[in-house]
Amino acid sequence: DYKVTGVQTCALPICASANDVLAVLRPLRADESLVADVDRASTAESGSDFVEALKDECQFWAGEIYCQPFWKLVQSGAASKAVVLGWGIEFYHFVESANEYMAAGVANCREDARIREILARHYVEESGHGQIFLEGLRRCGIDSLRVRSAPPLASTRALINYLYETAVSNCFAYAGVFAVMQSSRNQLSIVHISSFYDRLSQMYPHAAGMFGAFRDHALIDVELEHSRIGLDDIVKLAPELVLRNAPSILTSARLLVEHFILFFEGIEDYY
């Protein structure tokens, strides 16, 4: 039977047993979208089982990120011009930082050369994507030189620094955090992506160029099949090493969720 953290706390106020609460939660847990089995990854007995459980948990935590006030504000159509364009500016800094933390992840990988090759291939695929967002902001009338020369917000810098620190300290944890950044277990369709960004462009016409860049980048991810993360390939090469590093991978992924929440809070608070 699976466990849910805090189930006893939920059961006591309503005078129910823990088993009764678990029985109610089982249907909600079916797709890992409402209830996550946070023990499944930490108790996995094989590398492949761990990776599958990690991706399920990260899909759940990604839902927490997208439930934050920033996203509710943006999707309501009520976000200010400054907040919307500020999102684009900070996201540019984040995407461009791949040339910091992803390069560091490759350089500091001390494992099998084949693992380093997996990390390097992913870095090559992402290394030039900042230019896409810079061009999108330019189409909104924002000077590219000013964007590039301006420092990111402290909350954005904290996210970048965290990824850099993870990349240089443990290549398995570094590969695992992409389960948060590429949290969808299924490849998003071109129609779904286009519909989402078309809707945002209609709500915020002044940012249509920026959302076009967001759309273009998302479509590149579809083409490169980034719903599949590097850890999927690494676990085939070194399942025992992935399982041995499972605690570090889990901790790093969960902390990254917190940094992303702060990233979006920083945008709303500052802009």
Image (spheres, rainbow, N blue to C red):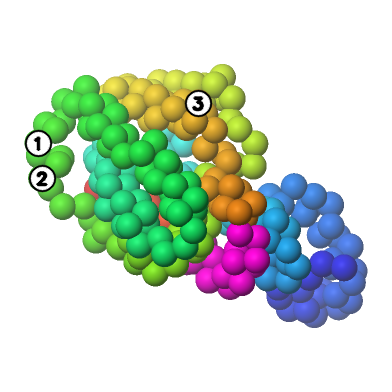
Say which residue appears at 54% left-offset and 33% top-offset. Answer: 225
Determine whether label 2 and label 1 are within 8 Å by CB.
Answer: yes
Q: Residues within 10 Å of mark 1 (few under 14, many from 20)?
A: few
Q: Report the disc number at residue 54.
A: none
Q: Residues within 10 Å of mark 2 (few under 14, many from 20)?
A: few
Please identify the quarter of the rendering in which residue 201 is found: top left
Prevailing secondary structure of the magenta residues: helix
Q: Where does the image place residue 265, in percent across and percent down from the top left?
A: 37, 56
Say which residue appears at 23% left-offset and 26% top-offset. Answer: 135
Q: Is residue 3 magenta?
A: no
In terms of depth relative to the viewer, which is nearer, 209 or 40?
40
Which of the two marks, 3 or 2, is nearer to us in this view?
Answer: 3
Q: Secondary structure at mark 1?
A: helix
Q: Is residue 244 magenta?
A: yes
Q: Where does the image place residue 192, in percent across and percent down from the top left?
A: 57, 25
Q: In the drawing, does residue 260 fall left or right of residue 11?
A: left
State whether residue 54 is above or below residue 127.
Answer: below
Q: Where does the image place residue 215, in percent across and percent down from the top left?
A: 42, 26
Please, what is the three-letter code of the amino acid marked with disc 1?
Leu
Q: Which residue is mark 1?
A: 145
Q: Which residue is mark 2?
A: 149
State whether residue 10 is above or below residue 126.
Answer: below
Q: Secondary structure at mark 3?
A: helix
Q: CA distance from mark 3 to mark 1?
A: 30 Å
Say which residue appears at 56% left-offset and 19% top-offset. Answer: 191
Please give the range of residues in magenta.
238-257
Q: Of the two numbered discs 3 and 2 on the same chain, state the one appearing first in sequence.
A: 2
Q: Which residue is mark 3?
A: 223
Residue closest to the far front:
113
Q: In the drawing, does residue 139 fall left or right of residue 244?
A: left
Whether residue 114 is visible, yes or no, is yes
Determine whether label 3 and label 1 are within 8 Å by CB.
Answer: no
